[in-house]
Image (cartoon, coloured by chain):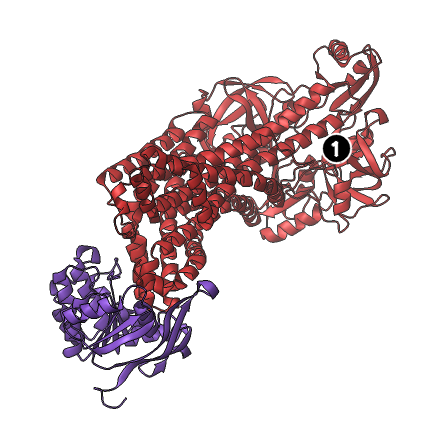
Chain colours: A purple, B red
Amino acid sequence: MTTPATATIVATAELHRTYGEGEAAVHALRGVSIGFPVGELTAIMGPSGSGKSTLMHLLAGLDRPTSGSVVVDGQELANLDDRRLTALRRDKLGFVFQAYNLIPVLTARENITLPLMLAGTKVDSEWFDKLVDAVDLGDRLTHRPSELSGGQQQRVAIARALISRPAVVFADEPTGNLDSKSAAEVLGLLRRAVDEFGQTVIMVTHDATAAAVADRVVVLRDGGVVHDGVAEGAEELLDLMKQVA
Amino acid sequence: MVRMALRGLLARKLRTALTGFAVVVGVAFVSGTFIFTDTINASFDDLFERVSKGVDVNVTAKQAVEGDFGGRIQPLPDGTLEKVEGAEGVAAAEARFETQVTIFDKEDEAIGGNGPPSIVFSSNEERFDPLTYVEGGPAEEPGQVTLDKATADRHDFEVGDELRIAGRAPVTGYEISGITKLGDQNSLGIVSMAMPLAEVQKLAQEQGAITEVVAAAEGGTTPEQLKAEIVSALAGTAEVRTGEEQADKAATDISESLGFLQVGLLVFAGVAVLVGGFLIFNTFAVTVAQRSREFALLRTLGASRRQVLNSVIAETLVIGFLASVLGILAGLVLAPALRALMASFGIELPSTGTVVAARTIIVGLAVGMLATLVSGLVPARRATQVEPVEAMRDADTPGARRLSRKRLVGSIAVIGLGLVALLVGLFGGADGSAAASLLGLGVVVMMFGVALLAPVLVRPLARLIGAPLQRIQGLPGRLARENAERQPQRTAITASALMIGLALVVFTAIFAAGISRSVDKVIDEQFSRTALIVTHDDGFSPVPPSVAEQLATVEGVDVVSPMRFDQANIEGGGESVPVSGVEPATISQLFEPEIVEGGAQILASLSDDEVLADEGWAESHGFAVGDSVGVTTPKGTQLDYELIGTYDNQVGVLGEIIVTNASMTADWNQPDDAFILVGGRGAPDELQQAATRSLAEFPVAKSQTLAQFKDESADQVNQLLGLVYALLSLSVIVALLGIVNTLALAVHERTRELGLLRAVGMSKRQVRRMVRAESVITALIGAVLGLVLGIVFAVIVSRPLAADGFVLTFPVGTLVVLAILAAIAGVLAAIPPARRASRVDVLRAVTTE
């Protein structure tokens, strides 16, 4: 790592992922080499089956590549066993999912601090307050997920992703289940995480409006990168999507 | 639809197998019990048929009192043999006699102990002899004896060896002349020996006594004709039966006493079925909840509610049928295991071949299928209530349904109902079996009530039990507790299954502790002046009077007072009433029972035409001091005694009435002593050693200090306790499988959640810890409910016994150990689901379908 502005926090080299064998083999990724610099919001786009989710799962160490390498914060994931991979996820990565994936038996506050409780580390209350303030959940902290709206649940999930000040936050279709107003709030939050807190966010989405808030857009098709550039407006992105679809 | 149900079963193999297993265990227990008892009955039938070889008519003494225990076989009047021989149509007749003895192995250790009795029969003439001689031949000369093959093999005896036998006469050595079998049976369930008639009488010290005469008919005379001839020859002085009748009667007597065993085992089988039912209910309830989308889809596609119901019911029936078949097969294995279990507790029973009656198969199938059907009915109905629209909704994990106030009121009403049945059974004055049935019904209904109430209790109990876990384990402990509370019904049913077994274990443990404590108390309070208690080695047979005479000569012994035990029919007081005999001259120096009426010295002043009676018995049968008590003794003597006082009988030390030993000898023909109280100087231990040395001639007599006597009675109680534990263990195992099953289903249901926890950094170990903690919480909820319920049962059921001297004691150590064992069991039950949970694929959780 040199200067934070240009350092690459996540990088892949010749990443392949094949499901199944022989005739029935599906090549989800065919040699993707890509780097993600610190402090950027990157959107990964592409039609269904383009391999975008597979790429994110590999980047986050949730799945293992067939070949190629993934380096996160200087660590080659292939060299990590399950225990260290778990610790990496707990300490260095944050996750936001389409289905919120909160633990129903825990309150909003507990869901936010979950990674810290798992690690057995103390909650930085200043940071916690700041986050809660940012996601605007102050009066909802004692509620359980079933008592929250979809937008509120996703905001809890974002706070959870940020609580451990991870090296990277992965967001998998974070607006997929939300109405447009809630979606805008969530996207705004991810943007603020990058701008105000200096976070790195990698977001998989097929929503052009979502991608429009990104610093950079990577488009995949049939397991390969077909576009990698600065994000334009939603209009251009829609065109781009039409081309690759 | 039915075909779909079958496919569904195949698709969920593990769950089907676990559900099925609960049924298999219950059915195996039921069918095993039937196979076991049927086999014993058949063996005895076979035995008695063989024993009656060559016998056309059988003559025995009239039994004036039909007792189960303690009664002696009465001798036949003199001259019976001659009268039988003189009857027309008799080709041959033979007098028989038998006596119970103690024999010694080659190390000179007594064989038997609490095991089967050793009996010496008189040798038979060839035409009446049922035995086959594997080696050697019959004992024809004085000093010879034959021994059954099973005993010979076990203790390494061969023809020509010396066998030492002690009857009422001191130990004598006999030469083994032959090793015998009866048919293809090595053992008759007893140690059986034979020697010439006069020799047996000598062993028993009853010269000339005979207990049985058998006769064979001349050609052309049927057994019935011969019986008629002999009946008229004996003129009603004895009981006469044809050989066939005699064998039937013996077999019936045996199967009646085995009836208790059968009922007892079936009760335990019932418990296993009940516990299994809980497990099945839970599995189906969970499966139906998880499949509500599938049912909704079927409904959308046009399936009627009835069709959905039928498909679930078909599933239960298929599981029920297959599991019942397996259960019956498993019963074949369980039957010999039960026999081995009984044998290990000293109840040796014969067995020829294996008897599987049609009844066994029918009842086994019915029990298994009914249990599955009934348990599956409520969940099946729930499946029909799924609305088609639910197919469209997101498949979230089924949420907890709210517990209604109705459930609270309903469950308390059910508990109350059970309590009423229990109390009516205890205090309602119903007779034996009706009272027992009410008691059992009350217990089962109360258990159901508590199981219904349990969901309400799950939350507070989980909090209580989960608090320390949370402190130790942090988040995994916290999540475990929350998960346990999540579906209170499910946790409650799982815990209740364990509760049932544990409640019974606790109840038994408290009762056993109470009995031991009560015996101790009576000994401390009423026998404080006694130094030694001398009994037969087996604990219940009487010892000859020469033992008491010998004890009186021991250095340091001041006073010896034998007590006897027998039975009598009492006019207006019932049949087979237990009767005690005492020595008025000495008894008061050693034994101080609680005298209610008549004054403290009433025992010492008891004369031969007077009786004392138990206060409670006298009152309930309307006897008052001064009344005349009409007694018929086993010998057939009818006498009137005057009731001169009453006592409070504690823990059955005494019979319902007390007579003098002189009356026992003269009127009961009972010269032997059940236990002999010894008073003396010096340390009891030294006195005991001196007594044992002095009794070398009477190895069957066992002298014990009060402390030893207490220990031994506690040992006996604990041995029984062990048997009950062993029989309940199957139910507890089923309950633990229930925990495995429920947790496995929960893990399956929470796959996404587990995956998420893994994604955000929960380690595999933390996942396992979480599942384990949930299992422990569930097990401990069951333990707490079981402990409380067991204690409640023990307190209630022991109430009426308090008057008989029952002291309620709580074996705190045992109860704590039980709770700890439950927690350990919880940990063990969690192993498979915890492993599965830790292997959950993280990706499955985060990818949206």
Does any portion of residue B732 appear in the rendered image?
Answer: no
Q: Residue at (64%, 36%) from the top-left corner?
A: B541
Q: B434 or B186: nearer the eye?
A: B186
Q: Residues within 10 Å of mark 1 (few under 14, many from 20)?
A: many
Q: Which of the 4 image quadrants contains residue B428?
A: top left
Residue B439's x, y, as percent? Answer: 41, 32
Q: On screen, A240 above or below B608? A: below
Relative horizontal placement of residue B309, taking residue B139 as reference (left or right): left
Residue B47's x, y, as percent? Answer: 72, 30
Residue type pointed to by label 1: Ala
Q: Which quadrant holds the C terminus of chain B?
A: bottom left
Name the chain letter of the residue that bears numbered label 1.
Answer: B
Residue A70's x, y, as percent? Answer: 35, 78
- Residue matched to label 1: B204
Relative horizontal placement of residue B466, taking residue B147 as reference (left or right): left
Q: Residue at (31%, 43%) from the top-left corner?
A: B297
Residue B805's x, y, as percent? Answer: 44, 38
Does any portion of residue B243 appear in the rendered image?
Answer: yes
Q: A172 or A52: nearer the eye?
A: A52
Q: On screen, B742 above or below B52? A: below
